Amino acid sequence: MTEARILLGVSATLQGTVALTFGLAFFGLWRGFGRRAALRWTIAWMVYGVGVLNTAAGLAFGFGNRWPTLGQAFLSMPLLIGVLLFRTGTEVVADPERAPIDAGLVATVAGVTVLVVVARLAAAAGWAGISPAMVNYVLPRLIMGGAYAWAFVPLARMAAPRSRQGITLLGYALVLLALRMFLAAAYELLQMARGLPQQPESLPLTIAQLSLLTRSGWTVLGTWRAGSRPTSGTRSCRSSGASSSPPTKPRAACRRPRRSQASGGRPSAASR
């Protein structure tokens, strides 16, 4: 194994570890604080982490290299599905009241799975114009780049993203991750044109990916830990009272129990 592949294997291992760590952190938010939306991020990070660790095991130990073509196709899917599932996380960041995962995402995951399986089988069968390098290296990067850009769409559609909540930073990270993947695909195509396919990709791009993934994970975690975006759509009495807008019925509902306790259930002069 060359030094470059060793460094890439270490980088992939770090990415997988970071992804699993964030997955456990979001799992804690879901179970410990009742944030149901965190379950989506938990699944996305966990699946992505398993996929990256599969890649690291393949680089370091040749894991899956001797598997049949169909087995290798399914072995590569956790990484791609994990990135596609980031879309579910950004949807709930943009709209905390969003319903459970819709049929569109399920259809997208199924379509990508069929595409990867058919492409790998076609490359193994020697179909004209479909090379193993194209299927194994270029196609996954194109899919991941498109998935990161797809995950950015719900944030771009928000009426007024607030940078103080980290939404702007999350959007930047997703756009840069998409750009990183497209650059990696272009790099592989350049290597193929030079007659040097299946070369380790640029180490700086891999380090940039690790940094951006870490930044995006901390951004969402920091937002929810601060309680800046409640997942149930409710507002606390304190946050409602801090507003400078005129009193509304929800605020009156927040104050009514405290007023009744203080005056024994009798309305105050202000309420009369």
Image: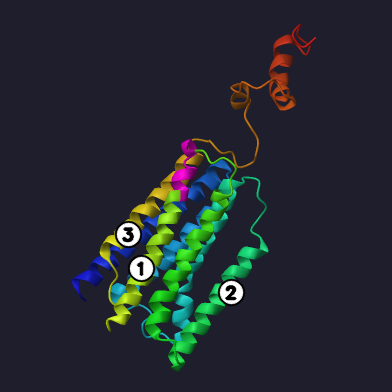
The answer to whether marks 2 and 1 mark residues whose Cβ atoms lie closer than 8 Å is no
Relative to 107, 224 lies left or right: left
Give the distance between the C-alpha atoms of the residues marked 3 and 1, in whole angstroms. Answer: 19 Å
Specify few, some or many for label 2: CA neighbours under 10 Å numbering under 14, 14-19, or 20 or more. few
Q: In which quarter of the image is the N terminus?
A: bottom left
Can you identify the residue that label 1 sits on? 184
Q: In which quarter of the image is the C terminus?
A: top right
At 49% from the left edge and 35% from the top edge, which residue is drawn? Answer: 226
Can you identify the residue that label 2 sits on? 111
**Residue 258 visible in the current orientation:** yes
Give the distance between the C-alpha atoms of the residues marked 2 and 1, in whole angstroms. Answer: 23 Å
Give, as a single range, the part of the protein colored magenta.
Answer: 163-171
Q: The disc labelled 1 sits on which kind of residue?
A: Ala
Specify few, some or many for label 1: CA neighbours under 10 Å numbering under 14, 14-19, or 20 or more. many
Q: Helix or strand or loop: what does disc 2 sit on?
A: helix
- Residue 3: give x, y in percent of width and height: 19, 70
Up-down: is 244 above or below 48? above
Relative to 45, 36 lies left or right: right
Give the distance between the C-alpha atoms of the residues marked 3 and 2, in whole angstroms. Answer: 29 Å
Q: Which of 72 and 172 is in front in this view?
A: 172
Pick whichever of labels 2 and 1 is earlier in the sequence: 2
Can you identify the residue that label 3 sits on? 14
- Residue 64: give x, y in percent of width and height: 38, 80
Q: The disc labelled 3 sits on which kind of residue?
A: Leu
Residue 225 within the magenta-colored segment of the rendering:
no
